[in-house]
Image (cartoon, helix red, strand yellow):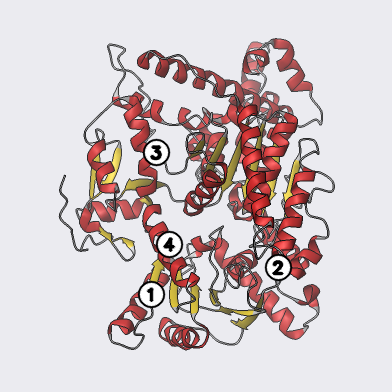
Amino acid sequence: MIAIFFRSTYIEQFLSKEPTVSFEVKCLFLTKFVFSALIDADRTNTRLFEAKKIEETANVEELFHVYYTRLMSKIRAFKESDDANTPINLLRSEMSEQCDQFAMKPSGIYTLSIPTGGGKTLASLRYALKHALTFHKKRIIYVVPYTTIIEQNAAEVRKILNDEANILEHHSNVIDDNHDNDEDEDGLLTVQQKLKLAKDNWDAPIIFTTMVQFLNVFFAKGSRNIRRLHNLCESVLIFDEVQKIPTACVSLFNQALNFLKTYGRSSIVLCTATQPALNFVEQKLDIQANAEMIARIDHVIEAFKRVEIIDKATDETFDNAKLSEFVKTLVEEVGSVLIILNTKSAAKSLYKQLNEQVIDGQCTEIPLYHLSTSMCASHRNHILQEVKEHLSKQEKVICISTQLIEAGVDVSFDCVIRSLAGLDSIAQAAGRCNRHGKDKIRKVYIIDHAEENLDRLKEIKVGKQLTKKMLVDLKHNPSVYGGHLLSRMAMERYFQEYYTKFESDLNYFIPGLGKSMMELLFSGRYETDSYYQSYARNTNEKLLLCIANSYGTAAEHFRVIDDHTTSVIVPYGKGKEVIADLNGGGTVDDLTRLLRNAQQFTVNLFDHEIQQLDRSGGLDSCMDGKVLVLREGAYNEEFGIDLENDSPVEFLGF
């Protein structure tokens, strides 16, 4: 496709293709597409030259046939299992069949609104494989909001498809890409270039990545990001929990998806139980008519109702002392309790308070766990496995977590306590309670936590205010929003009000420039440019310019997350071996393997956290300073990163 595309006739067809969008939009994406292809060709050629290898390409269509056969074999096994005829499993099977049939529809932007716990991972994979085979797509890309759920989803797909080699998992960037010099003075490969070559270009049949990485491909600086863009075309993209798109990036996200649909010949699935109103904003997402894959979705949502929402947020507040007493009461009554709080500090504080009571004998023999993004993926997975073992045995257990557990983590507690937040978060939290409908109805408590500081978390703060208003509305009029907080009517109303509140923020406004990313990228006709007008006036000549946009300036200022984060490799489990091996040098292929392995042992830290660890002596580096690693005393076996660097240190024998 790339070689053919570079012919002038195809570029002209691209620029004239309907439906018409602005010339600036077309030019931006055409420029980025061409640059992406050139960068990837250059990097790939250099890598093959150094390794003295010839590029090998997999037969993707043949591979997808094998995958689809294996998936259908798994689905048939589900249908023959002992519990296949339970009401929820029958619904799951029906929705999976609908996804298979929907795959015959042409490329476009569609929605998949399977309720939480409805089996959307397998259903979406079934759609993607069938659609890719029918319309000759080159790859399937899963985009998720958090690194915390990539491992689980990727592992599930690898197991079902019985393939470790062709399923790429890419999230944390453990390499600093701020250096421009690729070669040393003699033209030899430098450490920096080897690191760049070791990163993936997303040329794989199935890819799991994050929303941060996806948006970086289109809008962030660095050739490492844009290199992947052309491989997003002619693909099936599944956006899991798409409602988690950062508010400031909504317009940019919509423009990128519209490009991939119209010009990239890709199919896009917005996969979530809480669909955001992306076609209600000014820069609308071009969703197909009759886009929903699941028929009679309101009936399905009602049939999946497994919990009752208990409002304890409108008339009282909870501090950690009061909350810990409430947790102890509930765990004795129901068995397993999940508490989801909005901040890492609040979760850690509650964990410490309950842990002290366990030590004092007030909560004897009740396992207590903590989960947050201060822990690396391997650590979180280990904790989750222990929690799941207790749950499978129907034992008492307490788990305190941040919102990371809400997106795609397959756990089912007897009771959930959720700190007041956006309605989508409430719905996701409810999906961790009575997940498989084994009990008739279980309770989800919404509380207002008095000790959470949300001043730097504007989106959560606004979401909390809107949800509280809706709770008050329901208290005064129980029939409003269709009669319950988690109805589709309530969710649609919530997102419309939410995006209205953030209307001025949707275009990624840059305070230092007084302009938005949308203006920098898409509003630069040369006729209105002051420099062009001055030149034309002084010389009486016209410049042969198309546009006067500020691509470089926009990229310099783009951050998916407001505070820039840096990945740090931590000495948890086999992370110690990874750190030791990285210090030993090696070939490009060695680096590729090590950096992929390192993703399981990385934690993303904000700049102020990096500085605090540096002051306390908790940081070290390897690969000539390009990769940051954590010293052992700065990582705690209970809650992860210890900014004070005062955790117990085990002997490190390498």
Looking at the rendered image, the disc whose residue lies closer to the viewer, 4 or 2, is 2
Q: Could you say where residue 46 lies in the image, as x and y percent from the top left?
A: 41, 16
Are the residues flagged by discs 4 and 2 in contact, CB closer than 8 Å?
no
Q: Residue at x 63, y 28 (%)?
A: 62
- The residue beneath circle 2 is 86
Query: Taking the image as drawn, is residue 211 in sight?
Result: yes
- Quarter placement of the N terminus: top right
Left or right relative to 573: residue 92: right
Which disc is residue 368 wearing? 1
- Point out which mark residue 385 bears: 4
Q: Looking at the image, is mark 1 or mark 4 nearer the viewer?
A: 4
Image height of 151 relative to 580, above or below: below
Identify the element where label 3 is drawn.
Answer: helix
In the picture of the structure, the residue carrying the numbered disc 3 is 596
Secondary element under disc 4, as helix, strand or loop, is helix
Q: Residue type at mark 3?
A: Arg
- Going from N to C along the chain, the mark reached first, 1 or 4, is 1
Q: Is residue 302 left or right of residue 466?
A: right
Q: CA distance from mark 4 to mark 2?
A: 26 Å
